[in-house]
Image: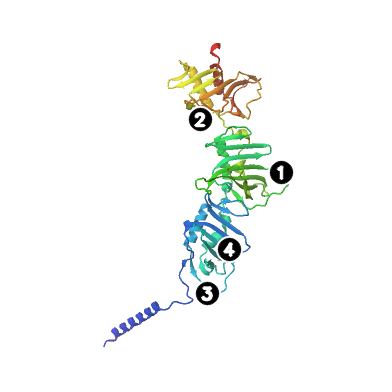
Amino acid sequence: MPKKPVIIALSAAIIIVVASIWLLRPPSATGAAGPQPVLDTDAASIVAFETTYRDGGTTRVERTLLGWQLVGEDGPPWAVQDVRARVAARILDDLQGRPIEDPGDLSPVATTLTITDARGRQMSLGLREPVIGGRRVVDRVDADGAVQHFSIDDQLYEMFERKGLLAWRDEGLLGALPGRPARLALSSGSTQIDLARVEGNWSLRAPVAARASEEAIDTLLRAIADLRVERFNESPPSLLEDSDPVSITLEADTTQPGEDPSRPLRITERVILTLHGPADTGGRLTRVGVTREREERRAGAEVEPLGTTYVAIDLEPLQQIALRPHNFVARTALAGDASLITGIKLGERSYTRTADGWSEGETALPQDRAAALDALTTQLTSTASTGINLTTAPELLGRASRRVPIEATTISGDPLGSADGLTLLTVTGAGGDSAALIIGGGVTREYKDPTSMAIARAVLVLSEPIESGG
């Protein structure tokens, strides 16, 4: 019999036996198992993360109706970067670890991470201090108290232990305010400015009641939103730093579920920013106190204080804005568009605009007078004043014309502007300089340009009593 076939057959038999022994071998008691999920959770169901440190301190981030927020006893609730919370939830959802059957000597637990899901289940992980060589070990604590050790990669430590939940905070100063600002108050010394959004439009409530400049308030809110916290957890200011700091109060209206599902609770969320002295030796940063309050919008409700924290901020965006009351008053005498005005009453004379043009009673107006009324409607709604005085009784330094009451109405007969209407007059100073004044709505608006003066003179003509030849 040839030797070669025998050798080949014998080799094949040896290979089969070795393979069978390998495949049928019993599992090693101490061999490392493959990676497996550490937690039974779903990223979308996680509603809270809480870390507890060896010194007993805790930090908690939870998902609220207003988004993810950092909550706790050490300061007011603060918005966190939504992307951080989503990434953390995904890391936990995808977390794989190798079970450690014989852990031997383990390093102490540095941080305990507790996760809560939408069903109220809580799962805990003990993050042990990394050992030499970079191995990361976590303890999974089951509901029955049983502990299992897993070796994992570094990603979980980077998110929850090395940086921590405090690093998730939104650096924007308005991260302390949930919702869209509905009221705004500025206080500096004896100056108090109160602004409120009513039916989508801003109004000045103090020091006078007047229509507010939407552009000026949007600029102010953008400046506040642009402020960035450079350092959290600053020390409080000393009593000697300044006794009369500037404060900015913002309020937002929100709703929350109540005991009666058909009647949600109406809540006012309030943040008070108090601008103190310098927070660094160079004077670039300012210490700002951030105070949060919550109040139910009902009679007799008490203010719920939510805490105060101090931060260091560069106020440069806000320093470009003059925080004076008249800067927040609307620059035009009336809101809306000139095309809305279909009726003008100047003193005792009334004019109506139809598709055929302006008329007085049944008499169509000449072209020059009709053009003057068109110019007046544009002046009232579109021309910005060159100066604003917060009074309806201005001091007139010069020779003044007679006063002309102005009432503007829409096609439905509704009045435009304040209930007491507007009053126009011209003033000529001793040096010959002239100005047109439009008084009403709590303020006096001044116009000095030639076009405005020409319109004012036309109004004086159009308002002359009929019996005087007007």
Residues 95 and 449: in front is: 95
Residue drawn at x 52%, y 28% as measured from the top left: 381
> Where residue 336 is drawn, which disc sits there?
2
Residue linked to disc 1: 243
Residue 139 coordinates in the image, percent (x, y):
54, 67
**Within the image, what quadrant is residue 8 found in?**
bottom left
Residues 65 and 223: in front is: 65
Distance from disc 2 to disc 3, alpha carbons, whole Å, reads 78 Å
Residue linked to disc 4: 111
Mark 4 surroundings within 10 Å by alpha-carbon count, few (fewer than 14), some (14 through 19), many (20 or more): many
Mark 2 surroundings within 10 Å by alpha-carbon count, few (fewer than 14), some (14 through 19), many (20 or more): few
Distance from disc 1 to disc 2, alpha carbons, whole Å, reads 43 Å
**Exactly how many numbered labels are in the figure?**
4
Q: Earlier in the sequence, mark 2 or mark 3?
A: 3
Q: Please, what is the three-letter code of the amino acid marked with disc 4?
A: Thr
SS of the residue at dot 3?
loop
Q: Is residue 213 above or below residue 99?
A: above
Q: Please, what is the three-letter code of the amino acid marked with disc 3?
A: Asp
Residue drawn at x 55%, y 74% as measured from the top left: 104
Residue 123 coordinates in the image, percent (x, y):
52, 63
Q: Earlier in the sequence, mark 2 or mark 4?
A: 4
Q: Earlier in the sequence, mark 4 or mark 3?
A: 3
Q: Earlier in the sequence, mark 1 or mark 4?
A: 4
One can see residue 447 in this view: no
Distance from disc 4 to disc 3, alpha carbons, whole Å, reads 22 Å
Residue linked to disc 3: 102
Mark 1 surroundings within 10 Å by alpha-carbon count, few (fewer than 14), some (14 through 19), many (20 or more): few
